[in-house]
Amino acid sequence: LGLARSDPHPIDLRFIDCKYVYDMVYLPGKTDWVRSAVERGIRASDGLGMLVMQSALSLGHWFPEREVPIEAMRRAAWSALGEERN
C-alpha cells in the first residue's frame, strides 16, 4: 500500500495512539500516510532511509576495503526523488 496515490492508508491514524510511524514505501513528497501522520502531530518516516542503509551494507560487503559514502548515497537518493530532506 502507498505506491499509488489512491491506495488506502495501511492503518487509520484516527484510531491509534502512537508517537511515531514508519512507512516502508517512499515517494517524492512522502506518502499520503506519512503526510497524514505529520499533520496529526505524529513523527513519521518513510522507507528511503532503509533503502540507503541496505545499499550501504551491500556496498560495504562487496568492497570492504573502501569507506562507504553513506551521506553521499543519502543525498543521491533524495536528489533522485527531486527533494531535499533532513
Image: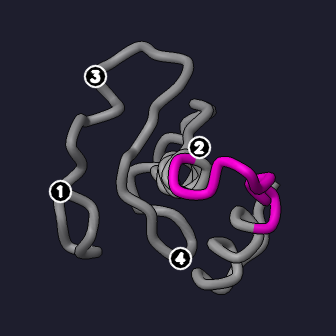
Comes first in the chain, label 1 or label 2: 1
Q: Amino acid at mark 3?
A: Phe
Is 69 contained in the magenta span?
yes
* Placement of 13 over or under 16, stated as above or below: below
What residue sits right under mark 2 in the picture?
A: 38
- Residue found 45% across the figure and 71% down from its top: 27
Comes first in the chain, label 4 or label 3: 3
Tag 4: Cα neighbours inside 10 Å, few (<14), some, or many (≥20)?
few
CA separation in Å, label 3 and label 2: 15 Å
Determine the residue located farthest toward the top in the rendered image.
17
Tag 2: Cα neighbours inside 10 Å, few (<14), some, or many (≥20)?
some
Comes first in the chain, label 1 or label 3: 1
* Placement of 50 over or under 35, stated as above or below: above
- Residue found 49% across the figure and 52% down from its top: 58
Tag 3: Cα neighbours inside 10 Å, few (<14), some, or many (≥20)?
few
Label 3: which secondary element: helix
Label 1: which secondary element: loop
Q: Which residues are magenta?
A: 61-72
Q: Are marks 1 and 4 in contact (CB under 8 Å)?
A: no
Label 4: which secondary element: loop
In the rendered structure, find residue 28 and report the number of the disc placed on it.
4
In the rendered structure, find residue 15 and report the number of the disc placed on it.
3
* Placement of 62 over or under 17, stated as above or below: below
What residue sits right under mark 1 in the picture?
A: 8
Determine the residue located farthest toward the front in the rendered image.
65
CA separation in Å, label 2 and label 4: 16 Å
Dividing the picture into quadrants, the one containing residue 7 is: bottom left
Q: Are marks 1 and 2 in contact (CB under 8 Å)?
A: no
Q: Measuring from the top left, give residue 23's x and y in whole percent.
A: 39, 45
